[in-house]
């Protein structure tokens, strides 16, 4: 795929009445062995959406040697979302994949502060 290909995914769970959460692989680069993916979890990184986000993340991770999780568009994040971020990093490490969190939004930063999580330890900043 070309660098600027966008692969849209349908909206999250059927219970997502807001229609605002659509995790998406923004870009895949290079060939399958060296593929780099940029993954955006969507607007809501919350308990309602984590299963869907995790499933789509695992698919992107399986197809890529390197993955960047772009958190810039996350507008809502709760404890389950923070747990998912930790699990994302661990899953990539277990598969020996290069992994980076990018651009944590104000919602991600606020959620980390609210529950006393050291965001720098999670995202590597």
Image: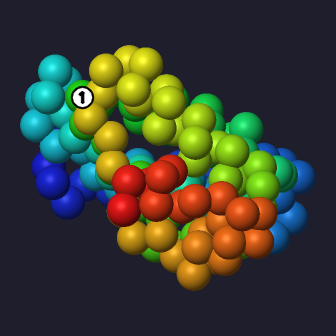
What residue is drawn where x is 68% and y is 72%?
A: 113
Side of 71 relative to 34 (left or right): right
On the image, which quarter does residue 78 sit in? bottom right
Outermost bottom residue: 106
Q: Residues within 10 Å of mark 1 (few under 14, many from 20)?
A: many
The picture places residue 61, in percent across and down from the top left corner, at: 40, 31
Instruction: Say above or below: 15 vs 60.
Output: below
Q: Quadrant of the C terminus?
A: bottom left
Side of 15 relative to 91 (left or right): right
Instruction: Say above or below: 110 vs 30.
Output: below
Q: Is residue 75 visible?
A: no
Camera-nearest residue between 18 and 46: 46
Camera-nearest residue between 109 and 105: 109
On the image, which quarter does residue 52 sit in? top right
The picture places residue 69, in percent across and down from the top left corner, at: 41, 52
Instruction: Label 1, secondary structure: give it.
Output: loop
Side of 9 relative to 68 (left or right): right
Camera-nearest residue between 75 and 1: 75
What residue is drawn where x is 65% and y is 59%?
A: 117
Camera-nearest residue between 84 and 21: 84
Q: How is the image coloured?
A: rainbow
Question: Count the marks: how many?
Answer: 1
Instruction: Say above or below: 113 vs 86.
Output: below
- Return the residue at label 1: 65
Side of 11 relative to 24 (left or right): right
The picture places residue 22, in percent across and down from the top left corner, at: 61, 58
Instruction: Say above or below: 41 vs 87.
Output: below
Q: Quadrant of the N terminus?
A: top left
What residue is drawn where x is 52% and y is 38%?
A: 88
What residue is drawn where x is 38% and y is 54%?
A: 124
The picture places residue 103, in percent across and down from the top left corner, at: 39, 70
Q: Is residue 96 visible?
A: yes
């Amino acid at each position: 795929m070309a660098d600027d290909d966008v692969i849209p995914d349908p909206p999250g769970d059927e219970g997502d009445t807001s229609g605002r959460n659509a995790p998406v692989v923004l870009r895949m680069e290079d060939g399958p062995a060296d593929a780099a993916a940029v993954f955006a979890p969507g607007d809501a990184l919350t308990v309602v959406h984590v299963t869907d986000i995790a499933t789509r993340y695992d698919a992107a991770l399986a197809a890529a040697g390197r993955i960047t999780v772009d958190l810039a568009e996350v507008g809502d994040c709760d404890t389950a979302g923070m747990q998912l971020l930790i699990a994302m990093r661990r899953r990539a490490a277990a598969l020996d994949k290069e992994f980076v969190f990018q651009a944590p939004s104000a919602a991600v930063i606020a959620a980390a502060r609210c529950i006393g999580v050291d965001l720098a330890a999670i995202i590597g900043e």
